[in-house]
Amino acid sequence: MAMARIILGEVFIAILAFAVVYAALSPTLQPTVFPQVQLPWFAPEGNVMTERYSLVKGTNVSQSINFVNLDVAMKLGGVYIIFSDRPNVAFEAVFQHAPNTTELDASASEDGGKLQVNAYAETGGLNLTLGKDYQYNGSLNIRLGGLAMKLGQDANISKFAVQIRYLGGVWLTINNGASFEQLDLNIDLGGLQLNVDADDLGRSGVINTSMNIGGLSLGVNVDTGLIGVSLDATVDIGGVSVNHSDFTGSVSSTHCSVKTMGYGSAVNKLDIKAIVGLGGVTLQQNVQRLPGFET
Amino acid sequence: MIFEDSVIMKMGKPEKEPVRRAGGSYFTSFLNRIGGVLLAPDATFNQIITDRIGFWEPLTLIILLVAIEGAVLASLAYRVFSVVANAVSPLTGVVWDPGFLNVILVIIISAMIIATLVAWVILAGIAHISAKYIFRGEGSFVQLMKLYGYTFVPVSLLILSTVLLGLSWATWPLTLFLNIVATFWIVLLMAVAVKHNYKIDTGKAFISSFIGPMTVWLVVVGGMWAWMWLLIRSLTGGAI
């Protein structure tokens, strides 16, 4: 019995020693991985339904079409939009969802020189590829989820409105040659990460953003001689932070009106307006990218 | 169970210092006490009383156990916090300092040690009042505090459970089980400690060590709620 007690005492000491070593090493050696919660409407990995829907000039789109009007809606999930240099592609959707959830409902019609595309996806991931030969108009409504969009030299948008109705985020990257006239980004509750990393734009554009609760993180890394960027931001409750040496103007704790130096003489202008209810606005040179979103 | 150490007492030579077993070190007898508290608490508590073990051993034991549990919790909190902080950093623009672990560590360990020491005194105090003045037992408060110090030994199971949870979230059922076992074990050990310290029966000891503190806790919490209710009532002019 005495030996058993001593052995148990040694086990006690061993537990304490192991705990001390663990406490010292685990923060550096063991990355935290949160337990995966499997929601019923999301398919486990490897058990995903994929649907494709494409509209290509010469195949199912008339040669006379030059304008595309998009009406895309999603209930719950993520949307990823890129512009491709593939010729003749007007619209391509790849929708991945769980087997027991609703399929992608997409349709298209032509009216004169305009192509109307309607797409509704209930729950899942929707990848949209748009072409370089068309000018795009339209809207994207998401109730709960996120949008990642990359605008480069193949992007040509006249007006595009994004609405995150309940909760979600928008990640938008603007690169060289992007051409857009107006982007409206409205989020009820969530964040907007906007990264302007370009030396030139296809034309001047406006980005209007509004968030009830959330934040705008804006990164601007441009050639100020070619692109003049302005930011007018107002936060009701929260703060505004401008930490960018290229910008001048007025900055207070809840409002800012700043422009890049040489804004007036820049070839193209990008005007960003932000209205935030509860939250913050930050302006800096580079926005850190969130893991998993290569925008 | 017969202990070699008790022979010393029978010879009329009470020891002030912790007893060293013949042919064994102080550390061996410490291990013997720790294992004995878990395997045979009755005999071990009697032996601790007989051997007049000093106050520092149980005090050190409590502080060591709580500090290690605090360190494991701090490392867990640090890992969770660092993931969350890194995730929101691009949105908030705030880059956090990894040295924050030291702050978390100091705060958690200090708070846990202070809270545990306060709880140690309060629990022993309530049990002492109940056992000595209500059930007319004979025993000292300081001796009870020493024995209560050893009742914290099952906290090692809590530490083990926290480490297991840190190693894998999937171990949460085992963690829950170990926490329940440790809690019941501590309650049981406290009852045994009171029983031997005051020489009262097990029922009275259980009432003194568990029912008594629980009653006090319920009275205090109930009093606070009643005070809150009266405060709200007075602020609303009796509308509620």
Image: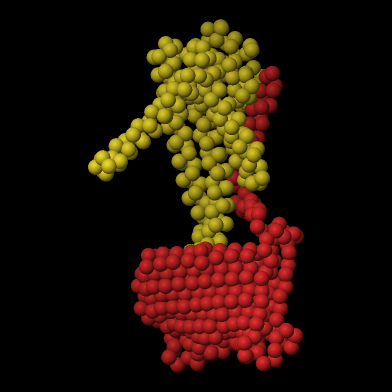
List x then y, in percent, for residue A48: 73, 62
Relative to B83, is B152 above or below? above
Quarter of the N terminus of chain B within the rendering = top right
Relative to B15, is A12 above or below? below
Relative to B89, is A130 above or below? below
Q: Which residue: 52% across, 77% down?
A: A161
Viewer-proximal residue among A29 and A248:
A248
Q: Which chain is red?
A: A
List x then y, in percent, for residue B176: 61, 37
Viewer-proximal residue among A33 and A246:
A33
List x then y, in percent, for residue B89: 52, 63
Quarter of the C terminus of chain B within the rendering = top left
Q: Which residue: 39% across, 33% down?
A: B221
Residue A176 lies in quadrant: bottom right
Please identify the residue farthest to the left as the structure is shown.
Answer: B237
Q: Which chain is yellow?
A: B
In the figure, is residue B53 to the left or right of A125?
A: left
